Image: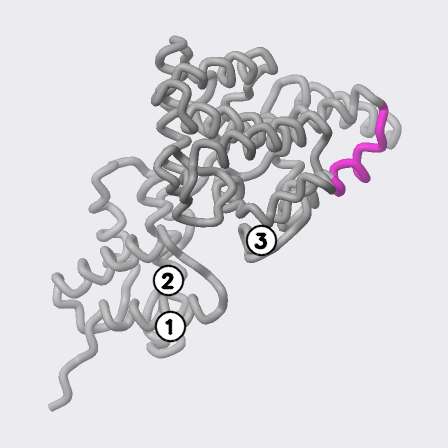
Amino acid sequence: MKAPVSWSKRIEDYLIYRHSLGFELKSEAGTLKQFANFLDQTETQGSLTVALTVAWARTSKRSTPITWGRRLEIARGFAQYWQRYDPTSEIAPLDWFGPPHRRLVPHIYTEAEILVLMEAAAQLTPPNGLRPATCRTVFGLLASTGLRIGEATKLTRSDVDLDNAVLIIREAKFHKSRLVPFDPGVTAALRSYARLRDRIVLRAESDRFFLFDTGRPAIQSDIRYALRTLCARLGWQPRSDYKHHRLQDMRHTFIVRSILRFYEQGIEIDRAVVALSTYVGHAHVADTYWYATGIPELMNIAAERFHQYAWETQ
């Protein structure tokens, strides 16, 4: 008699299928493997049911409806796939535990905070080493271009064209590449950093633009640790729904400050936001407008524009 196929094997096949379509599913893969282990341990050989999916979602260490909802959302992707092979399988409703996502308020940095943070980076160890300069330069680059931290740390030397003042972002989110021009101030900072890097690091482990003193590439966790260390020393508390300061909030800051500047300068907002959306690498312009909820100033402008629109259409 043929042994039944385990849920672990079924989910492994599902991940292979999704990877073949270009999806990375880095975090989702671990969650789905937990789902498979749960189903195998419960010796579930029949169809996938809503009851089983909901029961698994509740096994999360974080007992909150939004966490359960996010786990349910991930499991639904597999359930939709598996229903092709077993039409009797059930797909749990997305809103079973309520909305699986909510808009968390980010920390919007002031210009003064960015400057203080960059100055404080000089106190990082080792003294007179490359790590302080690397963190300082990355902070400045994120704040002045709105790059994702992963985009910044993956830059190679050939990706940073200082002569033409442009960054080449390769295979970023959604596998999209783009060019990111920058102003003369950024050019000077990157050129100064490159000279220091090449003077300190005589033998690099890779061709990455941002390195540490040993010659190894600077990675996201390194820069994130430096940010939190510096904010703790400065006694800063995040003005957000998050417990810690985040590198992503520098991107939030760049986008909302850019939109606010468009309004202040009287620039045609819709055209400007489309250009901004392309610049920061958003897949849809709606993703850029979503950032407008980041600061009260923009919400007030949006409310005033709607009020004016409603008045004119009466």
For label 2, the SS is: loop
Q: Quadrant of the N terminus?
A: bottom left
Does any portion of residue 146 appear in the rendered image? Answer: yes
Q: Nearer the viewer, residue 84 or 270?
A: 270
The mark found on residue 170 in the picture is 3
Q: Quadrant of residue 25?
A: bottom left
Q: Amino acid at mark 3?
A: Arg
Q: Which residue is mark 1?
A: 83
The mark found on residue 91 in the picture is 2
1 or 2: tag closer to the N-terminus: 1
The residue segment tinted magenta is 266-275
Point 27% across, 67% down: residue: 48
Asked whether disc 1 touches disc 2, contact meaning CB atoms under 8 Å apart, the reply is: yes
Residue 65 placed where, x, y %?
A: 33, 38
3 or 2: tag closer to the N-terminus: 2
Q: Main secondary structure of the magenta part?
A: helix
For label 3, the SS is: loop
1 or 3: tag closer to the N-terminus: 1
Q: Quadrant of the C terminus?
A: top right
